[in-house]
Image (spheres, grey):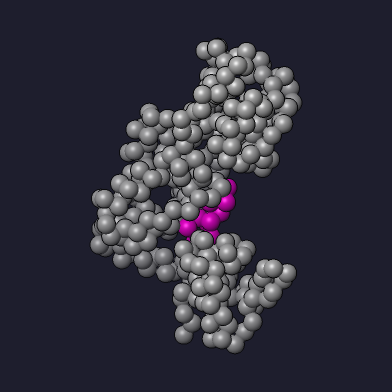
């Protein structure tokens, strides 16, 4: 009989694309994942990984096996849900994928609260892009995703996935302290046509929102710097290199050289929790979603 832990390791490599990424998702070292797959190769008498440059690629046989493992893991999840549902208490491992600013500004309090209330629940967090996290939920790699969308671009829910709204995160335009608009109570989008913008790279939710919104206002945003981390954007604004639209969640205290100004109308991004329909009855899911919604007003009030 094939070992389920080794099959999970192969599935993780297939989903994440590398041994290192799979190891990070599973909470193991890369060498441990490689060892698991090497043992699986001996069990199956099949080559599953082939060297390609500095990395590896899955063989055709490995892809076929990983697809079967995905179905097997769905059955295992159903069994786990039924057992946990019968016990009626959140327990076991719960893998959560969350975007960066919520992982910093919201999840530490949520995880600490869950740990206090439910010692039998082993909730584990992975920081991941919103779009990627939803796909990981669909494929059964993670149990729960905390993702976000923007007011002009609602997030579609894939088939077989349920979601709940956690709350709304407000955003400000950050400008250098000596910027002409730094003393204003608010500014309108039409007034920003000549500004130099600092934003996330193309393809990210925040970048796409900025481009669509300002283009709809009647001009092409002048993007001069791109940075994935909000803290990097704040540092660039502090250096006087441009302005940025940054959500409040996880932003932290602003340095003296940066002033937040209200953008009128104020942009809003909405936080969602997403999970597979098959796991909806699991107490660990329902309790985590309840805790997210319960703590959000307190967290958002302090940002």
Residue at the (54%, 72%) spot, across then down: 31
The image quadrant that residue 135 belongs to is bottom right
Instruction: Answer with the quarter of the image where residue 107 lies.
Output: top left
**187 or 142, which lies in front?**
187
**Residue 175, position as x, y percentages in the image:** 59, 22
Does residue 116 appear to the left or right of 101 in the view shown?
left
With respect to residue 118, does 42 lie above or below?
Answer: below
Q: Decide which of 118, 243 is in the foreground and name it.
A: 243
Closest to the observer: 213 or 23?
Answer: 23
Residue 221: tell me if it is visible: yes
Residue depicted at 60% across the width and 16% down the height: 178
The location of residue 235, given as percent across then percent down, is 58, 32
- The spot of residue 93 in percent (x, y) is 37, 61
**Residue drawn at 69 percent across, 34 percent down:** 225
The verdict on residue 133 being magenta is: yes
Q: Quadrant of residue 214?
A: top right
Q: Is residue 41 magenta?
A: no
Please tell me whether residue 134 is drawn above or below residue 271 in the rendered image: below
What main secondary structure does the magenta stretch of the protein show? helix
Residue shown at 53%/56% (left/top)? Answer: 136
Residue 266 image point, x, y percent: 53, 22
Residue 239, relative to residue 89: is it above or below? Answer: above
The quadrant of the rendering that contains the C terminus is top left
Region rendered in magenta: 131-142
């Amino acid at each position: 009989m094939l070992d389920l832990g080794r099959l999970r390791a192969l599935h993780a490599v297939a989903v994440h694309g590398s041994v290192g990424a799979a190891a990070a998702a599973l909470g193991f070292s890369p060498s441990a994942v490689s060892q698991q797959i090497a043992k699986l190769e001996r069990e199956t008498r099949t080559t599953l990984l082939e060297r390609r440059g500095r990395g590896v690629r899955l063989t055709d046989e490995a892809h076929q096996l990983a697809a079967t493992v995905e179905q097997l893991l769905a059955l295992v999840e159903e069994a786990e849900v039924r057992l946990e549902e019968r016990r009626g208490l959140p327990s076991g491992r719960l893998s959560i994928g969350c975007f960066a600013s919520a992982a910093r500004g919201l999840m530490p309090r949520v995880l600490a609260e869950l740990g206090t209330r439910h010692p039998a629940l082993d909730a584990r967090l992975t920081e991941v892009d919103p779009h990627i996290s939803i796909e990981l939920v669909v494929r059964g790699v993670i149990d729960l995703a905390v993702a976000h969308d923007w007011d002009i671009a609602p997030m579609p829910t894939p088939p077989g996935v349920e979601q709940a709204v956690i709350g709304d995160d407000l955003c400000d335009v950050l400008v250098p302290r000596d910027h002409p608009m730094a003393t204003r109570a608010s500014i309108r989008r039409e007034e920003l046509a000549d500004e130099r913008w600092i934003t996330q790279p193309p393809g990210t939710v925040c970048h796409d929102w900025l481009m669509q919104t300002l283009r709809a206002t009647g001009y092409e945003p002048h993007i001069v710097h791109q940075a994935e981390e909000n803290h990097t954007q704040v540092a660039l604004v502090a250096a006087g290199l441009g302005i940025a639209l940054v959500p409040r969640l996880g932003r932290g205290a602003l340095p003296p050289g940066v002033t937040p100004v209200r953008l009128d109308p104020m942009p809003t991004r909405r936080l969602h929790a997403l999970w597979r329909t098959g796991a909806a009855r699991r107490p660990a899911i329902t309790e985590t979603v309840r805790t997210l919604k319960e703590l959000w007003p307190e967290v958002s009030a302090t940002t």
